[in-house]
Amino acid sequence: MIGPYDLQVDQSLGKLIRVIPDFPKPGIIFKDITPLLSNASAFKSCCLAFAELADQAEYIAGIEARGFIFGSVVAGLSGKGFIPIRKSGKLPGQTLSVDYDLEYGTASLEIHKGLIPADSKVLIIDDVIATGGTASAAVDLVIAAGLIPIATAFLLEIPPLGGRSRIASKYPKLQIHTLLAE
Ligand code: AMP
């Protein structure tokens, strides 16, 4: 496993993450990435840093919704196909589904079944890893679809919530990359 904050981005970009206390529920400290997204050079350098990981994969999967923002750009930049991992009931074809716990509730994620050639290598991208429940569900879905999750990559992690260690112990061979410290 590669260590934290291993992709090359200017760590001062972390100042563009806005902290919104008590959103969407009391007690949650929400990391709002919209200031970073609206800053052209910051957004570009994050996408380019994620794209450094894309060579080893044949597809880029993004987790709805904020994983789509980075994942689709990275797929386009690197010439790979994009796989949407969506919230329940959004994908029109036959799906595989996984239920999981969130920092603020429960949810389920889905992936299309039988669309991507078996054993294709996949890089999974999302904005934030908190408890790791969402990322873990996405990895489970990629595996259930007959694909090989090579790496996960996040803009930001929230270390006290333990997502990285949870994912690392469940999938010891999976790479876990993050761009910015908390
Ligand atoms: P988790 O499953 O707990 O790792 O949560 C990760 C998912 O929920 C990601 O898709 C994030 O977009 C979102 N998320 C969880 N906690 C936060 C937070 N404190 N700030 C922003 N997004 C969060």
Image (spheres, rainbow, N blue to C red):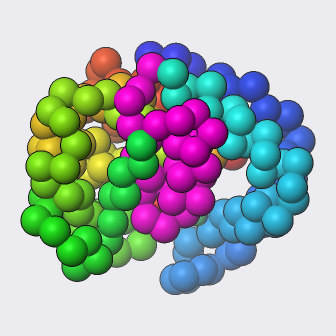
Q: Is residue 177 shown to the viewer in this render?
A: no
Q: Quadrant of residue 116?
A: top left
Bounds of the magenta segment: 56-80
Q: Is residue 77 magenta?
A: yes
Residue 142: give x, y in percent of width and height: 23, 43
Residue 153: give x, y in percent of width and height: 52, 38
Q: Along the horizontal axis of the image, is 35 left or right of 163? A: right
Q: Is residue 80 shown to the viewer in this render?
A: yes
Q: Is residue 167 magenta?
A: no
Determine the residue positioned at 74% across, 68% down: 34
Of residues 10 and 60, the one nearer the viewer is 60
Quarter of the image containing the N terminus?
top left
Of residues 66 and 30, the one nearer the viewer is 66
Determine the residue positioned at 54% across, 52% down: 72
Q: Along the horizontal axis of the image, is 157 left or right of 82? A: right
Q: Along the horizontal axis of the image, is 170 left or right of 114? A: right
Tell how many labels.
0
Residue 168: give x, y in percent of width and height: 36, 28
Q: Residue placed farthest to the front in the image?
A: 79
Residue 53 in the image: above or below residue 144 = above
Residue 45: give x, y in percent of width and height: 79, 40
Determine the residue positioned at 62% across, 25% down: 52
Of residues 89 and 164, the one nearer the viewer is 89
Determine the residue positioned at 87% across, 59% down: 39
